[in-house]
Image (cartoon, rainbow, N blue to C red):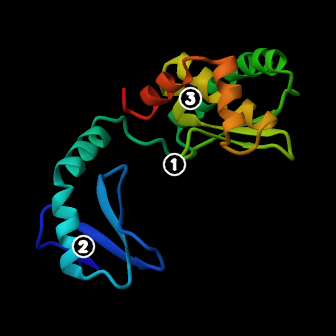
Amino acid sequence: MTSSLERPQYTVTRKRIRTLRMTVKAPHGSVHVSAPFHVSDAAIAEFVASKASWIRKAQQRIAAQPAPLEPGDPETERLRRQLRRDAQPLIAYWAERMGVPVPHLTVRTMTTRWGSCNKDRQRISLSTELARRDPELLEYVIVHELAHLIEPSHSQRFYRVMDTYLPDWKAKRRILNGRS
């Protein structure tokens, strides 16, 4: 269901969840609400209206971002090669420093995360978008993914590993996620 009675416009998906959830998605800043079956349309509209300021800020942040990368596009392929070239020495350095094996690197166009780690396959994947960011932020993502080779979950132990190897990781995460 799409509502146009309230500004901003939004799409609702009914799910088996307990609370209302809202996301503003790139590249167009569309607003998506996930709602429990028992919540009325009026309650959803009120929820969205109450978050109008937050929605506008999120949409402005999205509008300020560069156009998303398209798989197969020559610019995307250039950035992919650049990221691989920049990441390899950082991965080797940090893997040795952290005492983990050097994992296989995959560079992919990802829309919802900066990186991922498959501990069983000893593989990390990095988002091509990282090539557009400050190299210190690439280093943060690499250390984060290598930390998963030590501790797979985001547990207290994982965060202790991050604190040990990259004490300012929280500030870098805030910058990377646009919350500096």
Determine the secondary structure under disc 1.
loop
The amino acid marked with disc number 2 is Ile
Upstream in sequence: badge 2 or badge 1: 2
Mark 3, Cα crowd under 10 Å, few <14 / some 14-19 / many 20+, is: some
When the figure is inspected, residue 21 is found, relative to residue 17, above or below; the finding is above
Instruction: Give the residue pinned by disc 3.
Output: 79
Give coordinates of residue 115: x percent, y percent: 63, 39
**In this rendering, position of residue 161 left or right of residue 171:** right
| Residue name at image x 56 percent, y 23 percent | 169
**In this rendering, position of residue 39 left or right of residue 94:** left
Determine the secondary structure under disc 2.
helix
Mark 1, Cα crowd under 10 Å, few <14 / some 14-19 / many 20+, is: few
When the figure is inspected, residue 167 is found, relative to residue 4, above or below; the finding is above
Which sits in the foreground, 87 or 139? 139
Give coordinates of residue 147: x percent, y percent: 73, 31
Q: Which of the 4 quarters of the picture holds residue 81? A: top right
Q: Nearer the viewer, mark 3 or mark 1?
A: 1
| Residue name at image x 68 percent, y 42 percent | 155
Q: Which of the 4 quarters of the picture holds residue 21? A: bottom left
The amino acid marked with disc number 3 is Leu
Q: Nearer the viewer, mark 3 or mark 2?
A: 2
Instruction: Give the residue pinned by disc 2.
Output: 44
Tell me the quadrant of the picture where the C terminus can be found: top left
Q: CB under 8 Å between callouts 3 and 2?
A: no
Give coordinates of residue 134: x percent, y percent: 49, 19
Tell me the quadrant of the picture where the N terminus can be found: bottom left
When the figure is inspected, residue 120 is found, relative to residue 165, above or below; the finding is below
Q: CA distance from mark 2 to mark 1?
A: 25 Å
Upstream in sequence: badge 3 or badge 1: 3
The amino acid marked with disc number 1 is Thr
Give coordinates of residue 41: x percent, y percent: 23, 80
